[in-house]
Amino acid sequence: MNIIIKNIAVLAVSILTGLSAVYAQPGFGVAQRINADWQFQLETAGAAQNATAPNEQAWKTVRLPHDWGVKYPLSPNLASATGYLPGGIGWYRKQLSIPAEDQGKKVFLYFEGVYNRSEVFVNGKSVGKRPNGYVSFSYDISPYIEFGKENTIAVKVDHSKSADSRWYTGSGIYRDVWLVKADQVHLDQWGVYAYPEIKGKKGVLNTETTVVNSSSQRSAVTVQQELVDAEGRLVEKKPDSLRSLLPIKHAWI
């Protein structure tokens, strides 16, 4: 079940205006950037046709972020919006070892950006598709993981309709990818929302936190929200206790 906790903290205006750092790293679990040691191949006749039986000789090791288009020569036969570079269909894959002690946790793959029309596979099984090339997305891959073993992550990127913009978009996994591990009871993705209000010489910071219970049992949890200034000093904290967080898989409040 998703439950939203609302808090109000009163603080000086200078603290409100002093916060500056914003990060793309997901904050709903323990996140690990997994940009290294990916393999890539461009799909051609007789090359990669699916995630489980690719052309082994065609793979090349790459590091993300990656744009396959810039590796090819310019062509006057292509559109100016594509930068005169080819699109096509590309395949990425990576081996991930998930320790046996992580069994029981929620495991997510979080992609900051893939251009475009992507499909993600885990151990040969499709876990989801994403048509858009600019918005980040994540998948819960817990049901597809073999804990204590090597797992194959494969991503199909279909940019065959390459003249789809008024500017150069690139082709491929062009932003960071994260492996996120979370407990059954965890913060929802984008589950912390804050908005300030200025009232005279004082500022009010309103916060909302969404907590998810993915287990099969009720859970008692405490959520403590803390506000720190630009130097990392604690300005305000507010704990909230949830005595009975219900286990409902698909509930939004």
Image (spheres, rainbow, N blue to C red):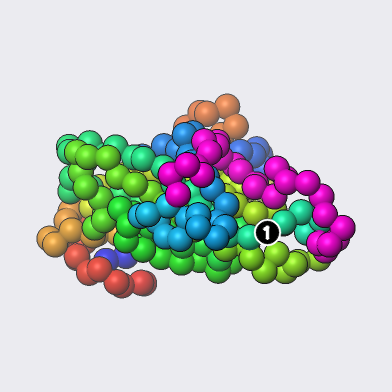
Residue 91 x, y percent position in the rendering: 51, 53
Q: Which of 170 and 228 is in front in this view?
A: 170
215 is within the stretch colored magenta: no
Query: As drawn, is 69 to the left or to the right of 38?
Result: right
Residue 1 x, y percent position in the rendering: 27, 66
Residue at the spot 72% in from the left edge and 56% down from the top edge? 86
Q: Three-letter amino acid code at disc 1? A: Gly
Residue at the spot 55% in from the left edge and 56% down from the top edge? 43
Q: Which of 103 and 202 is in front in this view?
A: 103
Residue under label 1, please give it. Answer: 87
Quadrant of res 62:
top right
- The region drawn magenta spans 55-81
80 is within the stretch colored magenta: yes
Q: Is mark 1 on a helix, strand or loop?
A: loop
Task: Check the picture and name the quadrant holding the C terminus.
Answer: bottom left
Quadrant of res 197:
bottom right
Residue 59 x, y percent position in the rendering: 50, 42
Residue 60 x, y percent position in the rendering: 53, 38
Vertical arrangement, residue 137 with respect to residue 238, above or below:
below
